[in-house]
Amino acid sequence: MAAYTIKPLVTATAISTGGRNGHSETTDQSVSVNLSVRKEMGGADLPGTTTPEHLFAAGYAACFGGALEVAARMHRKDVSGAVVRCATSVGPREGGGFGIAVQMHIQLPKLSAEEAQLVVQETHEKICPYSHATRGNIEITFEIETA
């Protein structure tokens, strides 16, 4: 597998204590969350808490949405009004341990089905850093909704 070197434009740093029943926050305090394990995973599911999967879903959806805008500009397509919903699941994997899976639902009301497919594919394969980081490591499915 090829290693890629990047020239960092921005670096986000987070510190977590207590794992899934703890607290995570970024060093610039822009994100500060309490975590708890959900009931489905045998935890207490405390009110006012979140999970790593929620944070991943929010980050991937936002990143993919921004990358979608880049791909659309390259193809001179209008993706204004686009909505990206990222559902991130966690569960046991074959071979042991746990893994994640992603379902990405993308609404592109101003594009034809063919145009939307082209822009989403370009976004996923060439632009989105989350897609690059997870490629070949997680199950990901796409559902594209157009006008």
Image: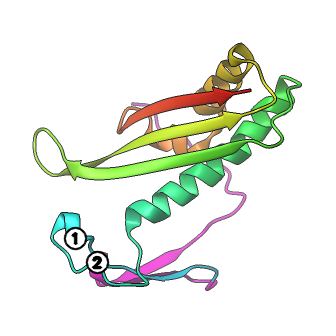
Q: Is residue 96 left or right of residue 17?
A: left
Amino acid type assigned to the residue bearing label 2 in the image: Asp
| 23 versus 64 height, above or below | below
The spot of residue 80 in percent (x, y) is 84, 41
Residue at the right extreme, as displayed: 76
Indicate whether residue 115 is drawn in magenta: no
Mark 1: secondary structure:
helix
- Label 2 sits on residue: 45
The spot of residue 51 in percent (x, y) is 38, 69
| 105 versus 51 height, above or below | above
At 80% across and 43% down in the image, what residue appears?
A: 81
Q: Is residue 18 visible?
A: yes
Q: Give 98 or 28, whichever is nearer the viewer.
A: 98
At 51% across and 48% down in the image, what residue appears?
A: 86
Q: Which quadrant of the structure image shows residue 17?
A: bottom left
Amino acid type assigned to the residue bearing label 1 in the image: Lys
Contact (Cβ within 8 Å) of mark 1 with mark 2? yes
Mark 2: secondary structure:
loop
In magenta, the rendered stretch is 1-29
Q: Is residue 6 visible?
A: no
